[in-house]
Image: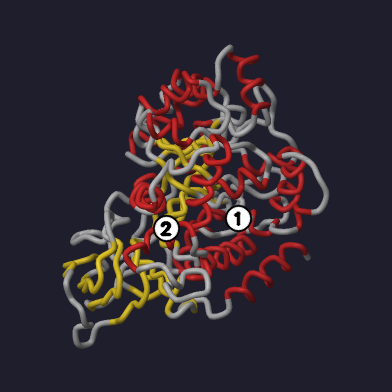
Amino acid sequence: MTATPRTYWLEHAWLGTHVEPGVAVDVADGRIAAVRAGTPAPPPGAEILRGLTLPGLANAHSHAFHRALRSTVQVGSGTFWTWREVMYATAERLTPDRYHALARAVYAEMALAGLTAVGEFHYVHHAPGGTPYADPNAMGEALLAAAAEAGIRITLLDTAYLSSGFGRPPTAHQLRFSDGDADAWAARSSLLKDRDHARIGAAVHSVRAVPAEQLSTVARWAEERRAPLHVHLSEQTAENDACREAHGCTPAQLLALHGVLGPRTTGVHNTHLTAEDIALIGGSGTGTCMCPTTERDLADGIGPAAALQNEGSPLSLGSDSHAVIDLFEEARAMELDERLRTRTRGHWTAAALLRAATVDGHAALGWDDTGVIEAGARADLTTVALDSVRTAGPLPRLGAETAVFAATAADVRHTVVAGRHVVRDGAHTLVPDVPGALAQAIQDLRA
């Protein structure tokens, strides 16, 4: 995923603290070789990116197959738990080939939205009924190939999912998620290998899905590889209640007891936390991935993101169930939800929200050298139009505020990954008909 040396001229560039007009970025071997501010005109031969160019965006939490649920789950009423039954029915129809086709289209949609990396929380490991494929990682390999073909980076967060609840075996739907125990999960996951566009990480699906005595096995696997470790944490009050009944403590406290929390760990959602939970998460340096569009779509609640960050938890953002794929919407939703909850404004600056969408999001996925426009960083860039009906009018120096509080994924004009144009002028360069690919993949899944 590298490109020949070239220069990009950025009409306006977000440099982490401010918008700089006229910036030339030299790229070699997929990395930024130099950043030259004060370049009012494009150098000869430079590729011109008009609008506001940001570092590439990171989607820290994805379930690619949930994209097939978009709109269909909006019929009728219910809760997270009724939604889950529809999700299980969709998961049942996945095969490696079908998953590859769907994920390729979903990751291409992400590239069109300015995303240059995705964290795929992957737990559909085996055939229906739990029988392993001939290649025990056929489903994971399908996702890795899909990301490569869509032109984006991926961190495959291979997920341990072993039980249906505290002390209960997997249900019929969940058998294909389970390896039996954490040792078998670790043996299978160890067969997956990093590659240029991909990192292999780990995940605990939730405290209800991994028995307490096996949590340390997953944590140790990640620690030995210095790999990211993610976990769905306190997404539902029912999970908290069941954890207290089974173990006499909250999910966050249980994870802390078994060594799961720490700087390479990210809790996803972190919605229903006690003050002690917030202190545990922040004090351990555990990250928080907020997924506001999914959290509101599933009626989960509003998590204490501001309190978590104040305690030391770095924030990242994810599109999770892909009700929409739009990291600008995720960023502003985090701020606007907090405004609704507190009835006050201004909890995060646009700069802070962009940090969650870029450098901290990439770091949560193990890409520590990505997410900034600086020499030495990976050459991942996202350009947002400043002349659309949503973004026209504000001064260019307010580009960060425009991107976060007005732009949508539809305003992304260019996406560059490792110095290579993956999206040019709003069109994907590797997947020529992304809507068609999505429609076909979802139709095949329903057939």
Q: Which residue is mark 1?
A: 322
Residue 103 in picture, x, y percent from top left? 57, 62
SS category of the residue bearing label 1: loop
Question: Left of 381 or right of it: where is 405?
Answer: right
- Do the numbered discs 2 and 1 sit on residues whose CB atoms are within 8 Å? no
Query: Residue at 16% across / 70% down in the picture?
Result: 36
- Of the 4 image quadrants, the one containing the N terminus is bottom left
Q: How is the image coloured?
A: secondary structure
Q: Nearer the viewer, residue 63 or 293?
A: 293
- Of the 4 image quadrants, the one containing the C terminus is bottom right
Give the label, 2 or 1, closer to the camera.
Answer: 1
Query: Residue at 75% across / 50% down in the picture?
Result: 89
Q: Residue furthest right?
A: 76
**Amino acid bearing label 2:** Ala
Q: Cα distance, mark 2 to mark 1? A: 15 Å
In the displayed structure, 136 sits above or below 234; it is below
Question: Left of 156 or right of it: where is 293?
Answer: right
Residue 34 in picture, x, y percent from top left? 16, 67
Residue 436 in picture, x, y percent from top left? 64, 76
Q: Residue furthest bottom?
A: 44
Query: Residue at 47% across / 69% down in the picture?
Result: 391
| Quarter location, residue 421 | bottom left
In the displayed structure, 347 sits above or below 253; it is below
Q: Is residue 383 at least partly visible in the picture?
A: yes
Q: Which residue is mark 2?
A: 117
**Amino acid bearing label 1:** His
Query: Residue at 73% across / 59% down in the picture?
Result: 71
Q: Nearer the viewer, residue 104 or 193?
A: 104
Label 2 vs 1, first from the N-terminus: 2
